[in-house]
Image: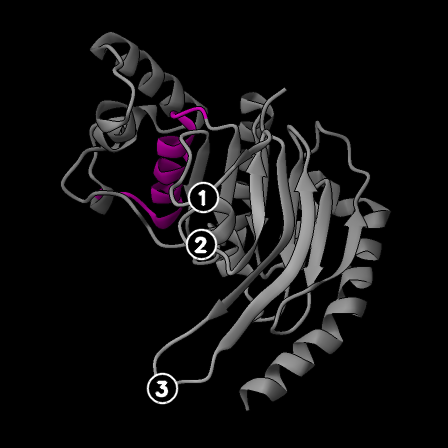
Amino acid sequence: MAGHLAVEQLSLTYSAPGQADTHAFGPVSFSVAPGEFVSIVGPSGCGKSSLLECVSGLIQPTNGEVKLDGQIVSDHVPPEVGMVFQQDASFPWLTVSDNIAFGLRYGRDTISAERIRLRVEEALVQVGLTEFAHHYPSQLSGGMRQRVSMARTLVMRPQLLLLDEPFAALDPQTRLLMGEELLQLWRQSGASVLLITHSLEEAVMLSDRVLVMSARPGLLRHELVTGWPRDRHTEITTHPDFSVHINALWAVLRDEAIAAMRMQA
């Protein structure tokens, strides 16, 4: 089964002329098994998003390696990797259908118009936007636009899905519903998932494992295995272990968050 991610002694230091180097994170090592859902939490400025960009191939780490199914990820995003960011990435001049089809039409592989149509229709059903296929992003709510971004990524059928705070701008109720949809899409796709989030509740609800990063330079301080079944839903928030897991994460994260605040003061 494809989608095995291995991060080995990865670190990143930013350098700029006339300025002191900034050690963003690392070294960190972890893995994501095929079909596994892993989240990373940590205080602001600990290097979570930079770590995700290194994993994707968008930026080069200072040291260490990222491997996807044994192949080194270097200076570009592999076609097997899909990414969804916090910012709405829809093209405002394209309809929902055309936004979802964009990567299929202009990607590396040649796909027939009929296959594109069928895959877009399937994605629209998956994210519940069939009746909005011919709408434009400006006619959609924030949650619906994030569904478009998710569908545009999943229609490429990635083996590894990287998510950087994709629901942070949404209200709590919509965020919970989007989490429900994400779990369903994850089960349907079979992809491995690596999620960056500030929300401990979101991390615990969605994940098989949660990794906690320290204040900058970010290091991995703790790993929590949730023990949830794969066929889980938002009702898992009522499980007795849900609050236990959150308290365990906060016990580690609290001191790191305080250290990060003092560093920024």
Label drawn at residue 145 = none
Residue type for callout 3: Gly
Secondary structure beneath dot 1 equals loop
Label 3 crowd (10 A; few <14 / some 14-19 / many >=20): few
Residue type for callout 1: Ser
Residue at 50% of width from left, 43% of height from top? 162
Label 1 crowd (10 A; few <14 / some 14-19 / many >=20): some
Q: Which residue is mark 1?
A: 74
Label 2 to label 1: alpha-carbon separation: 7 Å
| 137 in relation to 97, above or below | below
Contact between labelled residues 2 and 3, with CB atoms less than 8 Å apart: no
Q: Which residue is mark 2?
A: 60
Count of numbered labels shown in the rendering: 3
Residue 193 position, x and y percent, is 58, 38
Q: Indicate the quadrant where residue 103 lies.
A: top left
Secondary structure beneath dot 3 equals loop
Magenta stretch in the rendered image: 139-157
Contact between labelled residues 1 and 2, with CB atoms less than 8 Å apart: yes
Q: Nearer the viewer, residue 61 or 220?
A: 61
| 226 in relation to 107, above or below | below
Residue at 61% of width from left, 59% of height from top? 199
Residue 58 position, x and y percent, is 40, 49
Q: Nearer the viewer, residue 18 or 247?
A: 18
Q: Residue furthest left?
A: 93
Residue at 26% of width from left, 26% of height from top? 101
Label drawn at residue 18 = 3
Residue at 78% of width from left, 53% of height from top? 223
Magenta region, main secondary structure: helix
Residue 197 position, x and y percent, is 57, 56
